[in-house]
Image (cartoon, rainbow, N blue to C red):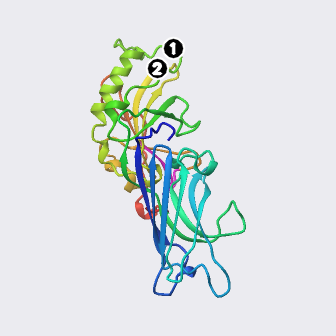
Amino acid sequence: MGHNTDSEYRRYSAVLREDNRNYAITPTRRPRGKAIVDIKGSQGFMKCSVKNLKPSKSEFSFLYYGIWLVSEENHKKVPIKTGILKSNSEGVGESTFRFNADNVKGTGLDFDSFSSLEVCIESTHKTAPGERVLIGELELEEANLSEDPKLEKVSPFGSKMPQSQWWKFYPGLLDSLMEYPSIQKDSKSHRQKGDKSDLSVQGLKERTQETLLHGCSNFGDVQIGSVFQGHQLVGLEYDREGAVKYLAHGIPGRFCLRDQPYGGATGYVYWHPLPGQQYKAGDYGYWLIHIDPVSGEVVFPRKPTKPPSCEECDRTY
């Protein structure tokens, strides 16, 4: 999110559901809550509210609840503590804090790195949460990005797709996002074998813009996995000689049928996991579509990835 300007604004929310039945204020009043995160430019503000949570001051102890943002890296959870919450005698609690959205709590992680929020019992171990009481997935609610956004070059697949380049952007802004920083991979020609059309750098930029505007004009309706907070990918895939083979568009989503855009009917039939994720129900990655840079037609260069049904997915929204 380092490309954000001061005029950019986004709001995220997380509905917090009970994850541990030992901390209800009464057997019939179960804990629940909600977190709202507002980000303007690089400045973030979070408000977390809970109800029906066992009061902080009990007969035997004084309970503190920690608020943790959670990222997943290499199949492991990375929790970052953001604040402390107390509940009163009615079981109601609220906490607010400000943070740098480009470098949350000095960890070097931006807010896009986090997928969920947890309320946990405060433990003596400062870098690890205690028992988890409430959990919620972060969802993008509202976005008002700058009028002149820029593509952000990323490496979403690590070393797993070396013959490719990728850029991150936000939906609804494609008209102004198609000015690539550079699409020159190396000094080799981007002309495909046996093709006499103009595939110079400038010509390819023009073809890329035209093709993606035509081929991806309806992607704004797609439902996507919550972990990605609304961004999408555009990419170039190369052959071994450095020539562009395909244009690609990526929509983030889990490896399950629910997250496959339009059930694959429009060409999003390939799923590739993030580093540390696998081809396992509920794991996170991107649904990809490939486009021929010359004809502008959707192509199917590999065997489609068949997702499992949602019943097999071990993560829910």
Element type at mark 1: loop
**How many residues crowd mark 2 within 10 Å: few (<14), some (14–19), many (20+)?**
many
> Magenta span has 187?
no
At 63% across and 77% down in the image, what residue appears? Answer: 63
* Quadrant hosting residue 207: top left
Of 43 and 21, the residue lying toward us: 43
Identified at 62% across, 84% down, the residue is 58
Q: Residue furthest right?
A: 124
Spatial separation of the CA atoms under disc 2 and disc 1: 8 Å
Q: Looking at the picture, how far across and down is residue 135, in whole percent?
A: 51, 67
Mark positioned earlier in the residue sequence (2 or 1):
1
**Looking at the rendering, in which quadrant would you find the C terminus?**
bottom left
- Please tell me the numbered disc located at residue 139: none
Q: Which residue is mark 2?
A: 243
Residue 112 picture location, percent across and down: 50, 48
- Image: 312 above or below 51: above
Q: Name the mark on residue 188.
A: 1
Say if 177 sits above or below 196 in the image: below
State the SS at label 2: loop
Above or below 93: residue 80: above
Q: Which stretch did the figure color magenta?
A: 279-287
User: Is residue 282 covered in magenta?
Assistant: yes
Q: Residue at x 39, y 25 (%)?
A: 179
What amino acid does circle 1 point to? Lys
Answer left or right for 104 relative to 195.
Answer: right
Tell me the quarter of the picture where residue 213 sits: top left
Q: Are dots 2 and 1 in contact, CB under 8 Å? A: yes
The amino acid type found where label 2 is placed reads Ala
User: Residue 212: percent from the left, percent from the top?
Assistant: 33, 31
Q: Is residue 276 left or right of residue 177?
A: right
Q: How many marks?
A: 2
| Badge 1 density bin: few <14, some 14–19, many ≥20, Cα 10 Å | few
